[in-house]
Amino acid sequence: MASNKFEQLYQCVACEQQLNRLSKCLPCLHSICQSCFRKTLDETNTNCTCPKCCAQFVDWKDFGASPIIAKELMRQEFHSSSEFKCDWCSEDGISSVAKFWCRECEKLFCNDCIRYHKRVTQKEHVFKDLDAMPRSDVIALVMKMQNNCALHEKELEMYCEKCVNFYCAKCYAIHANDPMTLCMNVTPVRVRDEVAKRKEQLSTLGHNMTSFEGEVKKLTEKILQFVSKFESDCEIKRAQIWSEYESICEKAKHDSLELKDQINDGMQSVLAKCHQMTQQNDGILQETSTWRLNLDHLMSEDRQDVQVLCGMQMLEKQCPVLRHDLPSTKTKYEILVEFPDYWCKTIDSLLNENDGSVTFEKVEKIKITKESRFNIPKAKYDRCITSIIVNQKDEHIFLCDLDNSSLIELKKNGEFRTEFEFFSVTNESFMPHDILITTENIFVVCGYCGKKNLLFLKEKTHFPFFQLTHFFETETNFVCLCEKNDTVFVLDADFKIHSFSKKCERLNIFQLEGFEHLNDPFDSLASCIRFDSSSETFWFSNFHHPELICLDLNFKQIKFMEKEKNFLHFHFSKFGQIIFGDQNEIFCFPKKQLFQFAEKQDLYSCIFVFEKKLFTTVKKDGEIGIEIFKIFY
């Protein structure tokens, strides 16, 4: 038995049982017993996997016992058993007594296997009958043959470096002179000399291995130190998170009380408005009773014709006025409640609840920072910018100039490119008021003061840079544009919305209701309509109207939002927030301030959002410029 120091060399790495001479040593130097080796083979019996390091190997049929311990394993097996076992049967998992020894194959055979072996052997093999020999002679014969030539029974004293094989002196002479082996010019090496040389290499290898083991131990020590520190840091972080959680819970309780107060204040405000409406309705009902008395009086048979006509004229004048004062039953009142940043953004349970009277809506927060500014070149008349847009194709900026009847084009770095005069294509007066660029890169411009009040332009690479492709003639003044699914929607001065195809063919007309009191033509020009793709709704604003109105796809009013500040132009962020400008401030509807200019300047209110940038026009000290902001969602 081997000493304890080398005990693991003689154990199967899979089952830890004692190895025998039929065990297999894999190229990874891990040895496994015969039974465990069969379990490592795949279904095709061509690949085997080491159960220790999981390395995979092919051509396993050439694997044998480790040459380092093969002789010791054979000695252990012979001394531990009273009978010799057949090698072929053992390989198949069968136990049978060996009766013969084949000198050439160096294997033990039983009676059955020796008959088959003699039949398939193509050259004469020398067999020894084990029953005719004492057991000690058999062991000596088998052990001796491990170091002797099977043909001449001489010591293997020569070594061929090229074919890596051992020979006796006679066999080596034949081998070295055989032209088929290609070893004729190889310097002969004696086994003893090669062993001495290799032992010196083993000494160096042992030293290197000791150094390597030291490096591995140091690395292991560093890993253990890291694990210890990592566990300690995680424990500290876990304690911090728990402390933060408790702090957040405490703060949430405090903020919940503030939110309750906000909702209560908003509720009281809505109730006060409703109370005011009921009082207003009571007053209207009192007026109605007065109408009724006057009407009944006029319907009396003794009333004179002149008296009836004069009375009817008075009633007809008063009736529409009182009807206009009647509050709308469609109005929805909103209570603005701002949840703290550390709260869940979606607040799903609130968003999913809707009892018909109280709803919650998710609003993503945004912030903006000023990025750059550049001025717009002066022109013949003072600039009056009515609209701004950015072309997604090249990020060029386009502005409508009302007083100069032109379209200004600037490069994305603010460099002036061209100024296109609309008279060159309309041959008549045209005052541009709004512009949009379709998905097919067609420029649509609306305006007034002429007959061609809707223009479809195609951009060109050379002067005059634009070509008129379609136009629509009308006496109606067009005010504002928006687009949905290749359909262009145009708002006119009579609060009608016209829909056009991409070939400038009018498709339909919709009438906006509730603006009869805005009968001044200049009031209607201060209007803006935009489409919100995130909610599939249209939004309408008029500078002189106190509410921002949400419209469905048929332009029916579905929601009203009271404006705390009057504004004209507005645009949507990617989450659907309404962004607008007022004097020297930029707001996100309804009242969150996004930016305030350090110096007072007139904000033209032209707003456009492109990707993560916001463009707006400003006027400072008589100079009109463009301010660009970066948006953070």
Image: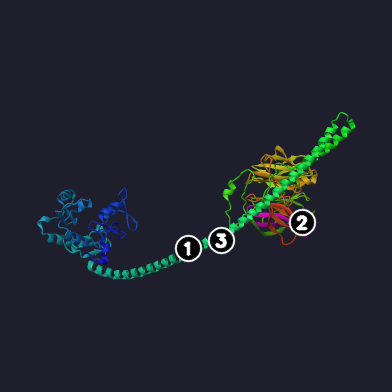
Q: Tell me which numbered mark, 2 or 3, is placed earlier along the sequence.
A: 3
| Mark 3, secondary structure of its residue | helix
Q: CA distance from mark 1 to mark 3?
A: 19 Å
Amino acid carrying label 1: it is Cys
Is 238 displayed left or right of 208 in the figure? right
Foreground tag (2 vs 3): 3
Q: According to the image, label 3 marks what residue?
A: 247
Q: Is residue 350 visible?
A: yes
Residue 57's image quarter? bottom left
Q: Position of residue 116 (x, y in %)?
A: 17, 48
Q: Tell me which numbered mark, 2 or 1, is placed earlier along the sequence.
A: 1
Residue 623 belongs to magenta span: yes
Q: Position of residue 332 (x, y in %)?
A: 68, 45
Q: According to the image, label 2 marks what residue?
A: 378
Amino acid carrying label 2: it is Lys
Foreground tag (1 vs 3): 3
Is 104 displayed left or right of 36 in the figure? left
Number of disc labels: 3
Q: Tell me which numbered mark, 1 or 3, is placed earlier along the sequence.
A: 1
Q: According to the image, label 1 marks what residue?
A: 234
Q: Residues within 10 Å of mark 2 (few under 14, many from 20)?
A: few
**Range covered by the magenta-colored residues:** 610-632
Q: Nearer the viewer, residue 559 or 322?
A: 322
Q: Is residue 175 above or below residue 335?
A: below
| Mark 1, secondary structure of its residue | helix
Q: Position of residue 223 (x, y in %)?
A: 42, 66
Q: Are marks 1 and 3 in contact (CB under 8 Å)?
A: no
| Mark 2, secondary structure of its residue | loop
Query: Magenta part mainly helix, strand or loop?
Result: strand
Q: Is residue 632 visible?
A: no
Classify the position of the C terminus by image quarter: bottom right
